[in-house]
Amino acid sequence: MRPARGAIPRFLLVGGATAALSALAIAVLVEGARLNPVVAASVVALGANLVGFVLNRKWSFLAFHERPLPQLMRYLCVSLAAFVTSVALFAFLTQRAGLHYVIASLVVSALFAAANFLAHLHWSFAERDPRHRSA
């Protein structure tokens, strides 16, 4: 696995690109499909997490020491916790604080970047007991 210092810029690039594309996708769903912004953000978050897993595993963390399914399960646990809290924060920012949904999406993404990086580094993609490595 890539050392944390080397993984940080790659993780931020993956996260930044995913956040920008997510904000664009939310805008398309809200303006084009007339979805509620919270619903649109929820739909987009699901797809973005799968893309994020693949890119982070292969590029950010170079986490080939284990089969992908256990890593995906841990990644999705972290993502689910972040998803629930970020959608709640997004709803608060848009519905209570009056922030525009695109700005709220970017703010939420920035706030969760550090916590997600640490969780993925130390849990999702962390090297496990050598007996559990893939052959």
Image (cartoon, helix red, strand yellow):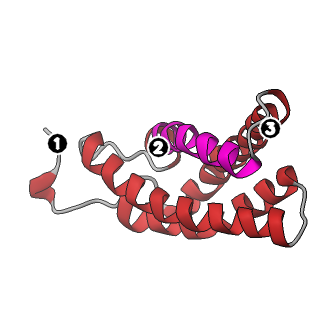
Observer able to see residue 128: yes
Residue 30 badge: 3
Instruction: Judge by depth and name the residue closer to the eye, 87 or 113.
Output: 87
Q: Name which residue lies at 80% across and 38% down.
A: 30
> Residue tagged by mark 1?
134
Element assignment for label 1: loop
Task: Check disc 1 and give the amino acid type.
Answer: Ser
* Residue range (magenta): 37-56
Tell me the mark number nearer the camera, choosing from 3 and 1. 3
- Classed neighbour count for the residue bearing mark 2: other residues with Cα under 10 Å, few (<14), some (14–19), many (≥20): many
Point 55% across, 59% down: residue: 83
Residue ID for mark 2: 53
Which label lies toward us, 2 or 3?
Answer: 3
Q: Amino acid at mark 3?
A: Val
Q: Label 2 vs label 3: CA separation?
A: 25 Å
- Nearer to us of marks 1 and 2 is 2
Q: Label 3: how many residues lie within 10 Å, few (<14), some (14-19) or many (20+)?
A: some
**Figure label count:** 3
Name the outermost residue toward the left: 131
x and y, in percent, of residue 95 in the image: 81, 65
Looking at the image, which is closer to me, 80 or 35? 35
Label 2: state its secondary structure. helix
Q: What quarter of the picture does the C terminus occupy?
A: top left
Can you tell which quarter of the image residue 115 is in? bottom right
Residue 125 in view here: no
Label 3 secondary element: helix
Cα separation, mark 3 vs mark 1, equals: 43 Å
Q: In the rendered view, does 14 fall on the left or right side of 103?
A: left
Labels 2 and 3: the sequence-earlier one: 3
> In the picture shown, does residue 61 fall above or below 48?
below
Q: Magenta includes 99?
A: no
